[in-house]
């Protein structure tokens, strides 16, 4: 979630570009502060210090800490969706359903492993950020289940439930590893998780090996 810093001194950026850069820096700062300190112990002052912007600028962009966190969470979800979607948008000719699902899982794990602050925000601290954040979490989980169902070709309620179970199981196991300080080694889970996904979908006739 890199955000380019504004040039030092006088510059010719339009006000809209300045606001966009400051907003991006605040979102990155929120993710990093929460990843390091936890949501409950993170204050607006912590975010301001990391982002190097004024309190006035913060409240021009966000109503409060919760609003900033939820926006950062939405950004994390968008990053994951873009990375996963990039792989699935490529030609699927000659690729089995299992191969496409393994690619999806690979991109998910690689993205989280390369962005530990994003991983902590997306998977762990969201549970401490209040009802609105949890609603977002449920919505994102549902969208991932829709994606799995589309790739696997789910046709009935039982198969759709299996796709939901896949998302829940992968999320829980990855979250457990992040909580244990293993965000930097998530790709080690790729093979066992791929086997788990295959087994769950095979039980409802969706896996093609």
Image (cartoon, helix red, strand yellow):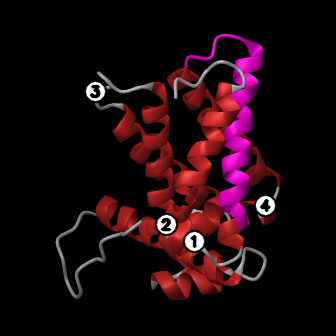
Closest to the camera, between mark 3 and mark 4, is 3
Q: Can residue 30 be seen by looking at this rendering?
A: yes
Mark sitting earlier along the chain (2/3): 3
Closest to the camera, between mark 4 and mark 2, is 2
The CA span between labels 4 and 2 is 20 Å
Residue 84, image x, y percentages: 44, 43
Residue range of the region highlighted in magenta in the rendering = 153-176
Mark sitting earlier along the chain (3/1): 3
Q: Is residue 94 above or below residue 176?
A: above
Query: What residue would you read off at disc 2?
Result: 113
Query: What residue would you read off at disc 4?
Result: 127
**Occupied quadrant, residue 13:** bottom left
Query: What residue would you read off at disc 1?
Result: 183
The CA span between labels 3 and 1 is 30 Å
Residue 147, image x, y percentages: 55, 30
Residue at x 57% of width, y 30% of height: 148
Mark sitting earlier along the chain (4/2): 2
């Amino acid at each position: 979630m890199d955000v380019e810093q504004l040039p030092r001194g006088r510059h010719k950026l339009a006000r809209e570009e300045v606001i966009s850069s400051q907003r991006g820096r605040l979102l990155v700062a929120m993710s990093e502060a929460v990843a390091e300190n936890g949501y409950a112990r993170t204050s607006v002052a912590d975010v301001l210090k990391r982002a190097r912007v004024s309190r006035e600028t913060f409240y021009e962009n966000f109503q409060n800490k919760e609003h900033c966190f939820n926006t950062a969470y939405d950004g994390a979800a968008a990053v994951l969706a873009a990375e996963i979607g990039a792989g699935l948008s490529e030609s699927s000719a000659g690729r089995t359903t299992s191969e496409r699902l393994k690619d999806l899982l690979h991109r998910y794990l690689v993205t989280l492993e390369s962005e530990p602050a994003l991983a902590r925000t997306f998977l762990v601290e969201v549970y401490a950020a209040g009802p609105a954040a949890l609603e977002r979490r449920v919505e994102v989980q549902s969208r991932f289940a829709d994606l799995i169902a589309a790739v696997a070709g789910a046709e009935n309620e039982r198969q759709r439930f299996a796709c939901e179970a896949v998302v829940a199981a992968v999320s829980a196991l990855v979250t457990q590893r992040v909580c244990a300080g293993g965000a930097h080694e998530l790709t080690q889970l790729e093979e066992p998780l791929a086997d788990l996904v295959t087994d769950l979908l095979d039980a409802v006739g969706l896996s093609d090996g």
